[in-house]
Image (cartoon, rainbow, N blue to C red):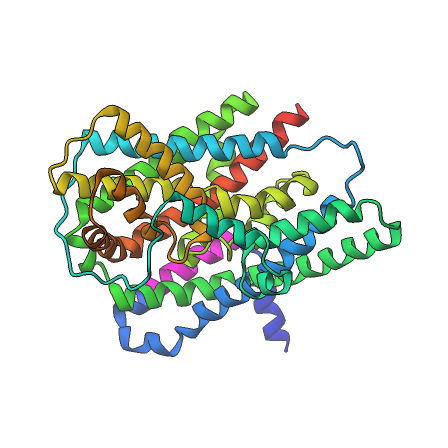
Amino acid sequence: MNAFKQLVNWLGQFSLISKIAAGIVLGVALASVSPESVSSISFLGGLFVNALKAVAPILVFLLVMSSIANQKIGQQSNMKPIIGLYLIGTLAAAVTAVTLSFMFPIQLELVANSASANPPQGIGEVLNTILFKVVQNPVEALLSANYIGILAWGIGLGLLLRHADQTTKTALHDMSNAVTGIVRFVIQLAPIGIFGLVATTVAETGLSALLSYSKLLLLLLSAMLIIALIVNPLLVFWKTRSNPYPLVFRALRESGVTAFFTRSSAANIPVNMQLCKDLELDEDTYSVSIPLGATVNMGGAAITITIMTLAAVNTLNIQVDMATALLLCVIAAVSACGASGVAGGSLLLIPLACSLFGISNDFAMQVVAVGFIVGVVQDSAETALNSSTDVIFTAAVCRSSES
C-alpha cells in the first residue's frame, strides 16, 4: 500500500501534458515493437473517449443552464464578440485554403467509392437538419449527444430560471460543480487513454496508406498550421493588443493534443472547460462559448471542404474564376458551421461544395473516399485546430474585456 501511495505521489509531480507525451511515446513504441499485443490494450483508448463523450452532454447542459440562470439581469455578456471571432476565423480558414489551392494545385488519384453515408444535397438540407436538431426532445438530445439541441434547451431553461428562487439557482450550481468534479477525474485518465489510442492507430494504419496522398495531406496540414500559428494569433492580438503566442501555444498543447487523438470536438469539451478554468476565465462566458464553439467554430472543416473541392476541380480541369472561389469560401464557411449537424462531418459536405462547379455526386463521393484515407491524420489535425481555437477566441475576448 505504501509503495502504491509513493507511486501516486511520484506521478503527481509531473504535469498532465508530460504524462500525455509519455503515453504517446509508449503507444508508438508498443505498436512498433509488438503490434500483435496492441489488441489487448486497445480498449483503453475507447474507454477514455467514451467516458468523455458520456459526461460531456450532461456537463454542457448543466453548465449552460446554471451559468445563465445565475447571471445577474443586466450583466454584460461577451458572447457577441466571441461569435464574431468564430465566424471571422472560419471564413479566414476558407480563404486561406483557397489561396493555397491556387498556389499549389493538387490533382487526385481517385479510389473506389467507400463512403456509404448520404451527403446533404444543398445548403437548405444542412440548415433544415440544424433547425430540427434545435427542437429535438431534450432527453433524446442528451442521449444522442445533439449539442445543438442541448444548447438550445440549456439556454432556454437558463433564461427562464433567472427568475427562480435562489435555492433553485444554488442547486443548479452545485449540480454543475459535481459533474465538473467527475470531468476532472476523467481528464486525469488522459495519459492512459491516449496511450491506447496511439498504439491502436499506429498498429492498424501505420503510414503506408498516406504516402500516395502525401501532397494533398501536406496542403491540408499547411493550411491548418497557417491558421493555428498566424491567423489565430493575429485575431488574438487584434482583440488583446498583447503577445498572443503564450495563449496560442498553451491551447494547442493542452487542448489540441487531446483533441488530436480523440478526434472528437464533443469529447474535448470537458478538456476545454477545464483549461478555461485554469486560465481563470469568466465561467458564465466559457460555459456557453465552449460548447457553442464545438458546434459552429469549424475552421478546420472549412479548410478540408475547400481544399478537397478544389482538388476535385483541378482533377477535372475545370477553370475557376475569383468570384466563384470567393463564393466557395462562403459556402465552405456556412457548411462548416453545420458540420456537427451532419453525420460524417466535414468530409460528407464535400459533395455539397462540389455541386457549385457542376461536379456529379458520384465523382464527388470518390473524393470523399480519398478523404477517408487521409482522414487518419487530417481529421485529427482538423479537430485539434477547431477545439483549441474555441479556447483561444474565448480567452481573447475575456481578456480584452478585462483590460
The residue that appears at 61% across and 54% down in the rendered structure is 150
Q: Indicate the position of residue 284 as horizontal and vertical percent values.
A: 70, 41
Instruction: Say if residue 138 shows up in the picture.
Output: yes
> How many numbered tags mark residues here?
0
Q: Indicate the position of residue 395 as horizontal and vertical percent values.
A: 58, 35
Looking at the figure, which quarter contains the C terminus?
top right
Looking at the figure, which quarter contains the N terminus?
bottom right
The residue that appears at 65% across and 26% down in the rendered structure is 401
Q: Front-most of 249 and 89? A: 89
Q: Does 17 lie within the magenta span?
A: yes
The residue that appears at 13% across and 42% down in the rendered structure is 315
The part of the chain drawn in magenta is 14-28
In the image: residue 279, left or right of residue 340 = right
Q: Is residue 244 above or below residue 363?
A: above
Residue 336 location, quadrant: top left
Q: Is residue 6 above or below residue 276?
A: below
The residue that appears at 44% across and 44% down in the rendered structure is 386
Q: Indicate the position of residue 231 as horizontal and vertical percent values.
A: 40, 29
